[in-house]
Image: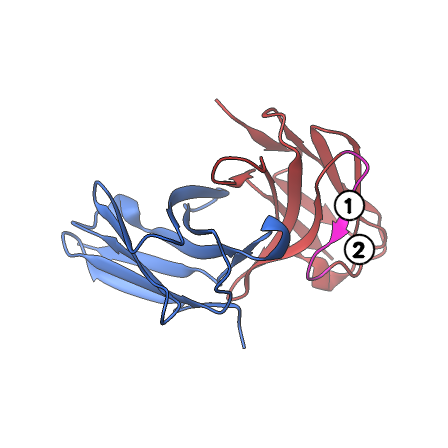
Chain colours: A blue, B red
Amino acid sequence: GEDVEQSLFLSVREGDSSVINCTYTDSSSTYLYWYKQEPGAGLQLLTYIFSNMDMKQDQRLTVLLNKKDKHLSLRIADTQTGDSAIYFCAFEGGSYIPTFGRGTSLIVHP
Amino acid sequence: DVKVTQSSRYLVKRTGEKVFLECVQDMDHENMFWYRQDPGLGLRLIYFSYDVKMKEKGDIPEGYSVSREKKERFSLILESASTNQTSMYLCASSSPDRNRELFFGEGSRLTVL
């Protein structure tokens, strides 16, 4: 199966919370990442979490890591139209090479 | 401001042509990467490089080669372009210290006719 799995689409109403989920297979990663790709642009790091943490909060973003279930999630509070983008979960595989999921397209509608 | 620059945003080539995609970074990063991005498939690693003149195959190296003659520059070469290489190509760089964040270029969209 896939090394990193994400659902392909998520649609939310402006002002609601968005939760993007990711499951992974490699439990040896030191870092797990969320990258954001806006239309017509490359990816930018949104946030990351150390593998020895359960949660990280950064303004409207909350990252939860469940190592037992190999599940990573990104919660965006008070989602805005400017949050519409593709969100990629990624983890470090062997030799510090990042492996990316397929990306979740977040669509925010009024 | 840190920057990864890809030389061409859009290219149109014919089947069988040789294609060069250039990438330059100004952050003195040791690591550089080439990915291709296709709808529904996410990012797939083609090649990466840890240092000048070093290269390693990624997940999908077939039909591609790379060159890293200088630390700041990493080139992707399609020796004989084929229609199934029509894609978005993303270059990235990183440093092995800190959180090993990847810095991406804006991408090169290649169409092979």
Label 2: chain letter: B
What label sits on residue B91 in the rendered view?
none
Q: Are marks 1 and 2 in contact (CB under 8 Å)?
A: no
What's the CA distance linking mark 1 and mark 2? 21 Å
Amino acid at dot 2: Ala
Is residue A67 one of those drawn in magenta?
Answer: no
Quadrant in which residue B6 is drawn: top right
Tag 2 residue? B81
Instruction: Name which residue lies at 16% across and 49% down.
Output: A78
Start-end of magenta stretch: B52-60
- Nearer the N terminus, badge 1 or badge 2? 1
Dominant secondary structure of the residues highlighted in magenta in the image: loop
Q: Quadrant of residue B30?
A: top right
Task: Answer left or right for A24 relative to B51.
Answer: left
Say few, some or many: other residues with alpha carbon within 10 Å of mark 2 (under 14 / 14 to 19 / 20 or more): many
In x, y percent, where is residue B35? 63, 51
Q: Is residue B6 above or below residue B45?
A: above
Q: Is residue A44 visible?
A: yes
The disc placed on residue B55 is: 1
- The amino acid type found where label 1 is placed reads Lys
Q: Give residue A100's position: percent from left, percent from top.
A: 51, 58
Q: Position of residue B67 (x, y in %)?
A: 80, 40
Dot 1 falls on a residue whose secondary structure is loop
| In the image: residue A78, left or right of residue B57 | left
- Chain where mark 1 sits: B
Q: Quadrant of the N terminus of chain A?
A: bottom right
Residues B64 and A50: in front is A50
Judged from this view, the residue extending furthest toward the front is: A52
Q: Residue at x 58, y 25 (%)?
A: B27
Seen from the viewer's position, the closer of residues B81 and A25 is A25
